[in-house]
Image: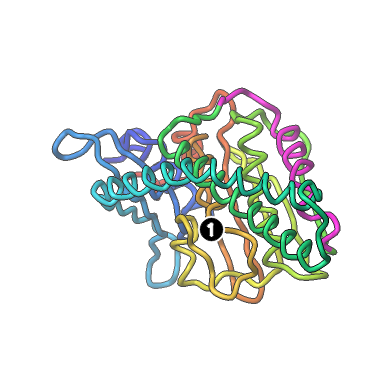
Amino acid sequence: MGKPVAEIAHDSQIALAVAETLRSQRPVAGESSMAVLPHAPDGSERAFRLRTTPMRDEEGRLLGAVTLLEDITRLREIDRLKSEFIATASHELRTPLTSVQMGIHLLLESAVGPLTEGQREVLTICREDCERLEKLMRDLLDLSRIEAGETAPHLVPISATTLIQAAVAAAQPHVDGQERTLRVEVPSGLPYVLADRLQIERVLSNLMSNAVRHTTQGDAIAVTVTPHEGYVAVAVTDTGSGIPPEYLPRIFEKFVQVPNAPSGGAGLGLAISKHLIEAHGGQISVRSEVGRGTTFTFTLPVAGVAPGPDQASHADKAQEV
């Protein structure tokens, strides 16, 4: 047709996926897995999983990108019902959990009598388990609200430099005291982006805490920011254990955890991060090699620039269909 993808697809996520694949020249896991396209063969709104991969000739030269749209409307409805059940169950569990926490607190404060050292040790373990359970329920409720569209980001133009530096500072406690090396590369002259500061801080906090869990003493963690046409890319890289290739396509799904990975999470942080970034009009992706480390990259649109056409504009004829 000789036209840019963005003019034909009517959905910025498609153009963004094609542009990112052509730029990196590799498939990216988990791109826009719940993108909802407004046009469907029967005229109704349907949900599609978007997957894109580079296309090469016999000599390995890049020819273009192949994009597959998989209709997952029925799967999405099932997922919605599961999310509603989880949200209801989590909400109902909060009141009894609060009562248990209050009881443990009173016992540890000796409000109902003195405790032996063994009793205090058991109650301390119970308190820690209650705190983990409370965090799990809070994440479940947050995820259900995000999926229901109740926590849409408050997008405002903000300096990308200010945003990332503030987000890294907020996430710094995850690294401090862990004997890991943290390197932050935020170049000067970055453009303004459209973002919700608190939500981006949460995304970076999730990614940096993941990096800490999958690294050991002496490993390195890096946060790098790279400007592109129409968007800014933020990458969190670690030199840790890496993710097996069979788990990469599912790493952004709820409750997915890599076997033998260090404990500390419930498998919700990446799912929450994915929803938040896509609500910003960006994408989040992962690259990893077992034993060598992992890189999570997310993008944010430049303020005043439509993410689809502009993020695709730097690709050449290979981007035309």
Residue displayed at 83% across by 66% down: 117
Quadrant assignment for the N terminus: top left
- Identify the residue position indicated by label 1 in the image: 267
Q: Secondary structure at mark 1?
A: loop
Residue 209 drawn above or below residue 40? below
- The span shown in magenta is 154-178
Query: Can you give x and y, in whole percent of width and height, for residue 244 in the image?
Result: 53, 73
Q: How is the image coloured?
A: rainbow
Residue 291 drawn above or below residue 188? below
Label 1: few (<14), some or many (≥20) within 10 Å? Answer: some
User: Horizontally, is 66 left or right of 240 in the view?
Assistant: left
Query: Can you give x and y, in whole percent of width and height, for residue 189 in the image?
Result: 75, 33
Quadrant assignment for the C terminus: top left
User: Horizontally, is 214 left or right of 268 in the view?
Assistant: right
Give the dominant element type of the magenta stretch: helix, strand or loop.
Answer: helix
Depth check: 94 or 164 in front?
Answer: 94
317 falls in the magenta region? no
Query: Can you give x and y, in whole percent of width and height, for residue 105 in the image?
Result: 73, 48
Depth check: 128 or 104 in front?
Answer: 104
Residue displayed at 66% across by 28% down: 192
User: Horizontally, is 25 left or right of 63 in the view?
Assistant: right
Residue displayed at 72% across by 40% down: 167
Residue 142 drawn above or below residue 179? above
Q: Quadrant of residue 200?
A: top right
The type of residue carrying mark 1 is: Gly
Query: Can you give x and y, in whole percent of width and height, for residue 31 in the image?
Result: 44, 51
Q: Quadrant of residue 175?
A: bottom right
